[in-house]
Image (cartoon, rainbow, N blue to C red):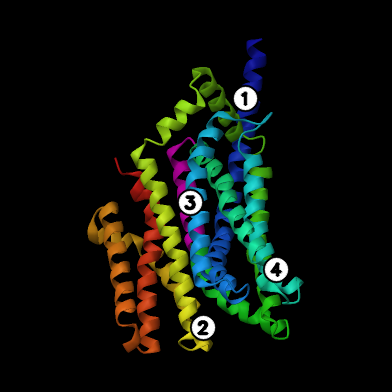
Amino acid sequence: MSELNSTISSEQEVEDKKRLNRLKIIFPLYNFTTAGYFNLEGYYLTFFLTNVYLFSVNQTAGLALISSVLAWAFAPIFATFVDRFKFKQSKYWPWLVMGFTGVLGSLMLIMSIPALAGGKNLSSLVPLVFVLIVVVRLSEQLMNVPMQGMFPKMAKSPGNRQYFAVSRKVGSELGKALFGYILPLALVAFTAASSGNEYKGYMIAAIIFFGLPLITGWILALFGVKGSYVEREGIADVERAKAKKIPLSAALKTLFTNRPVLGLFLFFTLHKTAFFIYVAYGTYIFTYILDINLLGAFFTLFSIGAVAGALAGRIWTKIFKESKRSCVMAMGAHVAVTAIIAIFFKGLSTPVFLGLFAVSTFFMGYVRKLGSTVICSIS
């Protein structure tokens, strides 16, 4: 019997090692392709809503606020639920598949409908788009919460933990930098290839830049996580949580009195809302006040500035020595530059306006990267 157990244990170790090596290949690829989705959604979705579906600035800001508040309320509740729930033989991968599909499928649909509809009666589709955005925000939690839960389980040794941490960072930052340059050029090229039809240009971009992370996300879930040691340990965690017999209501009560967690979600709710409003008003200014022909330059600088800010994070942290102080200083610089733009807007030339906006975005890029680490460390 002991020999049989030893054989099973040995075979399990071999299988776990194979799965670890598979995850080492899939995980960096997933993070790299996901950066394209972040760039396309983060820097172009608001423009698409206001200039294609004709959302007003107020509607866009309201959408950002509502979807952020829904995500803020749903995320901690869902995280508590996931800690106590498992499927028949899994815990993580079904949520990942649902999350990837909900987020990227909805975004792809939003940017493809105008081309499929021939550009007609798009303003009548505002309610549908509104619902799809809410689906995106809620699906993000189906994707992010399991990912955060399974990440510590992917590697046990310090070397492997470092590999996954570095590969996530390098893949994400490299993707942001590369896609930040490629996206504006790709949109121009896709539009030109579609005989100047901007709607078709966006649809092609959506299929590629949302489709790639959707495929790599499914690969990660189905061929990396499903049936792996990550799932096995996740199921064991659920069994241990159930054995403690702590009511879900008690867990939720503890959650919503936890200051660090509340601070984290409140920060990202306010920041995400401010980000949407920030992009919406920048788009509005170039469309209706300044030169609409420079709107592409605005988005290019916006993307490059944010990427540069994220990449410069190490330098900024070294200057101010400590992450929380660095985040506060970066946010202060972002607010100060944005205030200068608002106060002196009428006296600014277009090149100066673009330059200041790029500087403001530089600091926002750093804040978006560091914010979660800072808030999580608040005691």
Q: In the rendering, at what x and y percent does residue 54 appear?
A: 60, 74
Q: Earlier in the sequence, mark 4 or mark 2?
A: 4
Q: Secondary structure at mark 2?
A: helix
Q: Which of pointers 1 and 3 indicates the residue nearer the eye?
A: 3
Which circle, 4 or 2, is nearer the viewer?
2
> Would residue 42 be visible to someone looking at this image?
yes
Sequence-wise first label, 1 or 3: 1
The label on residue 112 is 4
Q: Amino acid at mark 2?
A: Thr
Q: Please tell me the numbered disc located at residue 362.
A: none
Disc 4 versus disc 3: nearer the observer: 3
Q: Magenta residues? A: 156-173
Secondary structure type for disc 4: helix
Of badges 4 and 1, nearer the viewer stands 4
| Lateral position of residue 216 relative to residue 297, left or right | right
- What is the secondary structure assignment of the residue under circle 3? helix
Amino acid type for the residue under numbered disc 1: Ser
Quarter location, residue 214: bottom right
Find residue 10 and name its label. Answer: 1
* Residue located 57% across and 58% down the image: 34
Q: Earlier in the sequence, mark 4 or mark 1?
A: 1
Contact check, label 4 and label 1, Cβ < 8 Å: no
Q: Label 4 is placed on what type of residue?
A: Ser
Do labels 2 and 1 touch, CB within 8 Å? no
Label 4 neighbour load within 10 Å: few <14, some 14-19, many 20+ = many
Residue ID for mark 2: 287
The residue indicated by pointer 3 is 69
The structure residue drawn at horizontal position 45% and vertical position 67%, both measured from the top left corner, is 277
